[in-house]
Amino acid sequence: MRAALTSIVSGTLFGAGLALGGMTDPVRVRGFLDILGDWDPTLAFVMGGAVIVMAIAWRIVPRMAEPLFGEQFHLPTRSDLTPSLIGGAALFGIGWGIAGLCPGPGIAALVIEPAAAAIFIVAMLAGMALVRLAEGASS
C-alpha cells in the first residue's frame, strides 16, 4: 500500500510539474528543438532543474542504508551501449521531434487535451507492442 501511494504521489507531482512547465504543449517542445528558428528555451530550464535534483540524489543515495519508500535500491547495473539501446534512443528522439511529446508529458496531456494526447498514447502503446513482438520473434 505504501509503495502504491508513493507511486501515485510521485506520478502526480511529476505530471503537475510537466504541466506547469508547459511540457504538455507540443508546440513548446518543438520550439526547443528548432534551434535555427524561433527557439524556446523553456525545456532547457525544465531539464536543468531535473539534472540538479538528480545530481543531489546521486550524492545522497550512496550514504543511505536503505531507501525511504522501498525494500531496496534499484540502481543501474549496466553501462554498455547496445544496438537496441541506440536504435530505441533514435526512435524516441524522432518521435519526440515529430509529436512534440514523450511518454510522461503525453500521459499528463490526457488531462489537458485528451483527444490529441490519446492519439499519441495509442501510437506509443502500439510501438511498444511491436517492439515486444519483435523481441519475442528474435529470441
Image (cartoon, rainbow, N blue to C red):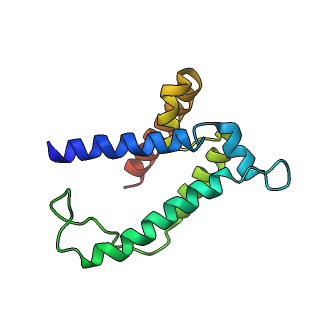
Vertical arrangement, residue 68 with respect to residue 11, above or below: below
Place of residue 108 in the rendered image (x, y in percent of width and height, measured from the top left):
48, 35
Q: Position of residue 50 (x, y in %)?
A: 50, 60
Position of residue 104 measured from the top left corner of the image (x, y, whole percent): 48, 43
Give residue 117's position: percent from left, percent from top. 55, 29
Return the residue nearer the eye: 127 or 67: 67
* Quarter holding residue 29: top right
Up-down relation of residue 61 to residue 112 (above or below): below
Which residue is depicted at the point 18% across and 58% down? 70
Q: Is residue 110 left or right of residue 74?
A: right
Residue at 69%, 42% in the rendered image: 28
Compare residues 83 and 35 and report the one nearer the observer.
35
Which residue occupies the extreme right position in the image?
A: 37
Q: Residue at x 37, y 76 (%)?
A: 59
Q: Is residue 114 left or right of residue 36?
A: left
Q: Quadrant of the C terminus?
A: bottom left
